[in-house]
Image (cartoon, helix red, strand yellow):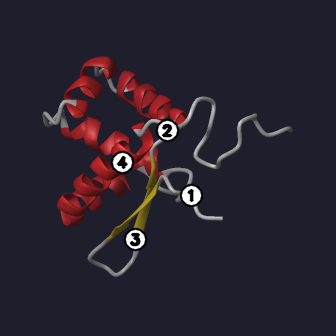
Amino acid sequence: MTNPDLVAVPLRDGTELRLVAGVNALCECEAELARAGFNPTQEMKFLNAGISGTVSAVRALVWAFARDQHPGLTLRHVGDLLGTDGEALRKGLAEALNRGSAEKEAGETSSGKTTPPAD
């Protein structure tokens, strides 16, 4: 089953970075920004408004959205990717945010399930 919220961003080296916007990813981004001394709320407001926030905020958001799909990815690696594939990553980030924030039917997740999975 494919994830309808997944955005595959093609990179210049022929690979792709897969991004998924979700609650856990947003929390990880906020935690990273706070750890680095930024105001996560303000940075997210800038990004949501289409205003270019700090490069650190963009890097943290790409990193957080890619972590589940690419577990070994580091912030430093994302910074390198932004240097070579910045435009593609910004477009992918916008698409991931758009898909992640699309309204779902009440109580429905992206997988279509209405109850949390059992452990």
Q: From the viewer's perspective, is 82 left or right of 29?
A: left
Contact, mark 1 vs mark 2 (Cβ under 8 Å): no
Label 4 CA crowd tier, 10 Å (few <14, some 14–19, many 20+): many
Pointer 3 residue = 16
Residue, disc 2: 25
**Mark 3 belongs to which amino acid?**
Glu
Tell me if residue 4 comes above or below residue 29 in the rendering.
below
Q: SS for tag 3?
A: strand
Q: Nearer the viewer, residue 56 or 93?
A: 93
- The amino acid on which the numbered mark 1 sits, given as a three-letter code, is Asn
The residue carrying mark 4 is 62
- Residue 49 vs 87, above or below: the answer is above
Quarter occupied by residue 87: bottom left
Q: Position of residue 80 (x, y in %)?
A: 27, 59
Q: Residue at x 41, y 27 (%)?
A: 30
Tell me the kind of residue under disc 2.
Answer: Ala
Q: CA distance from mark 2 to mark 3?
A: 19 Å
Q: Which residue is mark 1?
A: 3
Pointer 4 and pointer 2: residues touching (CB < 8 Å)?
Answer: no
* Residue 12 drawn above or below residue 106: below
Q: Amino acid at mark 4?
A: Val
Q: Which type of secondary structure does the marked residue at label 2 adopt?
A: helix
